[in-house]
Image (spheres, rainbow, N blue to C red):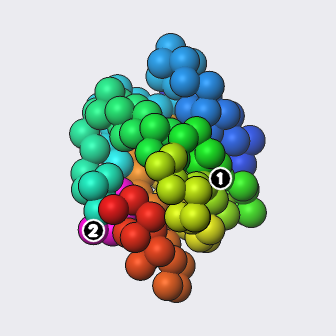
Amino acid sequence: MSQNVTPELVGKAYEALGSGDKAKVAEYWAEDMVWQVPGHNQLSGWKHGLDEFLHFMQRVGELSGGSFHMTPITVMTNDDYSCDVTNNQGTRAEDPNKKLNIDVAHVLRWRDGKVIAGKGGIMGDGTAQYDEFWS
């Protein structure tokens, strides 16, 4: 059954992701999903499957000492895609002087109410800041 992509659905998917509960995450993120992390750093590249994506999210939490957070700015949707713009901030766990503060657009492709593919695009000089932060 096809489910229309709405800003509320996008919000629920991110809420589930933030819960850390794999069963809850799997309600909105497909087991066979792919995700492309931008940049040229230890986290960059393709993540294949929900487990690899969740491992990436776990590393983000570890490297940022749990400080990484995304503040929603806006969400746009159509039948199969969403694009959410967020402000992402965090502090590196081992270096409180190393801070991240960037705007990011996440493009998500959906099938039957679940994310099947996603990627992030970083605005302006944020790409250099992103690579520096995670390196």
Q: Secondary structure at mark 1?
A: strand
**23 vs 101, nearest the viewer:** 101
Q: Residues within 10 Å of mark 1 (few under 14, many from 20)?
A: some
Q: Residues within 10 Å of mark 2 (few under 14, many from 20)?
A: some
> How many marks are shown on the rendered structure?
2
Residue 38 lies in the magenta-colored region: yes
Q: Which mark is residue 111?
A: none
Q: Residue at x 44, y 64 (%)?
A: 133
Q: Which residues are magenta?
A: 36-40
| Earlier residue among tags 2 and 1 | 2
Q: Secondary structure at mark 2?
A: loop
Q: Mark 2 sits on what residue?
A: 40
Relative to 120, residue 79 above or below: above
Res 60 seen here: no
**123 vs 28, nearest the viewer:** 123
Q: Residue at x 33, y 62 (%)?
A: 135
Q: Residue at x 62, y 45 (%)?
A: 67
Percent x, y of residue 46:
25, 51
Q: Amino acid at mark 2?
A: His
Relative to 12, residue 73 above or below: below
Q: Mark 1 sits on what residue?
A: 70
Do the residues under discs 2 and 1 have CB atoms within 8 angstroms? no
| Cα–Cα gap, marks 2 and 1 | 21 Å
